[in-house]
Image: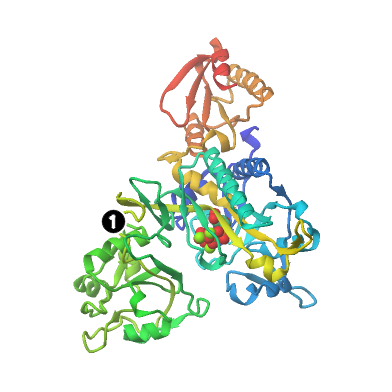
Amino acid sequence: MRQSTYLVPTLREAPAEAEAVSHKLMLRAGFIRQVAAGIYTYLPLGWRVLRKVETIVREEMDRAGAQEILMPAMQPAELWQESGRYQVYGPELIRLQDRHEREFALGPTHEEVVTTLVRNEVRSYRKLPMNLYQIQTKFRDERRPRFGLLRGREFLMKDAYSFDGDWEGLDKTYWSMYDAYSRIFTRCGLNFRPVEADAGAIGGEGGTHEFMALADIGEDTIATCTNCDYAANLEKAESGPGKQEYREVTVGEHEKFHTPAIRTIDQLTEAFGIDPKQLIKTLIYNVDGQPVAVLVRGDHEVNEIKVKNFLGAENVELADAETTQKVTGATVGFAGPVGLSVPILVDREVAAMPFGIVGANEQDHHIKNVRPGHDFSVEKTGDFRNVIEGDTCPRCEGTLKFYRGIEVGHVFKLGTKYSEKLGAKYLDQNGKEQVMIMGCYGIGVSRVLSAIVEQNHDDNGIIWPLSVAPFHVHLIPVSAKDETQMKLAEELYERLRSNGVEVLLDDRDERPGVKFKDSDLTGIPIRVTIGKGAADGRVEYKERRHNEQLDLALEEALTRIV
Ligand code: ATP
Ligand code: MG
Ligand code: MG
Ligand code: MG
């Protein structure tokens, strides 16, 4: 490919709204462009990487015996009504009507469609087990689309659905998917950990693991043991004698809260439907979806650690009364052991926004809300009492360490949840009707791109692992006007390409500095520069990941690459 006519619009500066490194770099390097919040166009380089990841996923799914299909994004509401999810899925489901006012949804996931397909087409045990997958665009109206491809509203997912005759069969399929996922993420060059996950909203009766790419920007916190292989999402982590309780609290489907000037724990409990014993921490978001306060009950110091780990941000701090007053103008008090409430500043600027404050009871401490009447919604609450960094592992004597992770994949034993509701049954060897046992397995294909960039970059740009790089070699004649250089470049270009090497030839009439900067930014793993040495048939060879640059004869350079 010749860069002079190729669409790689690099930027010196990232747009201000990009927070995550991967988001900034993919914008700056000309891989993606935002069309609307959480909705992106992939430019040629981004699309090439996406297809590489897709290919790895496809190869490993095929190798594991799964069959590729393609289901529609647009799904009739009846299917969702049949499974019972139409009412409960909430505002993440994008709903629409056709011209006849029939209701549809844009698929955030495909259990309904695939289970119906199998119900209609598969009747005999002879066809089982069956594992169907697709690589397809998903739609989720995320409350907080952010970090570029990490949390989109339209994104590419690989989703697979398995149908087995019995639970032993499911177990086998499940672990074969687990192995396939490990191979996929290894081939993508990711540093990842499979962790025990929480069943959460999907429901289901079996086990579930998430594949976490380790990165500070990750929205999940995982606890791992320094001694054994125990690893769990903190949503699920157990420690000591008490098992964690965790649940996602959706207040009237994220309906906005009107908070009065003062809320007591009891008032909050009533309003949020939370057992006070569980009110260890409640994240409060403002209307823009920024966490602005965390309500904590219990010991002050311990909770600071927990909250930091929960939010995974250095910029989180427990606000003491003085700071809070300074930032917000509020008068704040702290109460005793039962109902201690602590406002948390999530970044001082954000903290300047109003937050709600809770006390054990109103009389104890005359707490005033800063600006009463603001809208809050509550997203998560959980009991993290028993898990703090340094705690003893629930499986051995080791100590727990915390990491932040990006959920790039999820394997899930569904059991009969959907097959029962939608009637996916088969006749066993004795001609007896049985309900199929299902599993589902997702990979955030587009999210993987962000995860790779989060883990593979430096100050100058992206450093793509060879397996997913948009091109293998960036070929740079220093001067496009120099005939000798261009002739050698063209020769090398052809020879590399005829050997199956993917080459981007920077034939632009640009200053060398600009070319090298762009080259570092786009992160193509091997750079071959053709400069003054061209007259002697010599080129410069450099790998993006390393600093050293080699002066080589053309043939030497070729043998290194091909
Ligand atoms: P999350 O916890 O990040 O919201 P999820 O648990 O809702 O993800 P799943 O339903 O398990 O997601 O979907 C399978 C995979 O799809 C996830 O493991 C993740 O990699 C990817 N994914 C989910 N939501 C998004 C999104 N909004 N943008 C990009 N990828 C996503
Ligand atoms: Mg989600
Ligand atoms: Mg999740
Ligand atoms: Mg998940």
The residue tagged 1 is: 391
The quadrant holding residue 457 is top left
- Which residue is depicted at the point 21% across and 70% down? 320
- In the rendered image, is residue 368 in sight? yes
Total labels drawn = 1
Residue lying furthest bottom in this view?
363
The quadrant holding residue 300 is bottom left
Asked which colour scheme the image uses, the reply is: rainbow
Q: Position of residue 451 (x, y in %)?
A: 49, 48
Q: Residues within 10 Å of mark 1 (few under 14, many from 20)?
A: some
Q: Nearer the viewer, residue 482 or 158?
A: 158
Quick check: 402 above or below 296?
above
- Which residue is depicted at the point 22% across and 79% down? 335
Tag 1 secondary structure:
loop
Query: The C terminus is located in which quarter?
Result: top right
Residue lying furthest top in this view?
536
Q: Nearer the viewer, residue 393 or 354?
A: 393
- In the rendered image, is residue 355 in sight? no
Q: Nearer the viewer, residue 205 or 218?
A: 205
Q: Position of residue 92 (x, y in %)?
A: 58, 69
Q: Position of residue 245 (x, y in %)?
A: 40, 68
Q: Nearer the viewer, residue 159 or 154?
A: 159
Q: Is residue 294 left or right of residue 552?
A: left
Q: Give, as a three-letter code, the residue at label 1.
A: Asp
Q: Position of residue 456 (x, y in %)?
A: 46, 40
The quadrant holding residue 246 is bottom left
Q: Is residue 291 left or right of residue 540?
A: left
Quick check: 367 above or below 539?
below
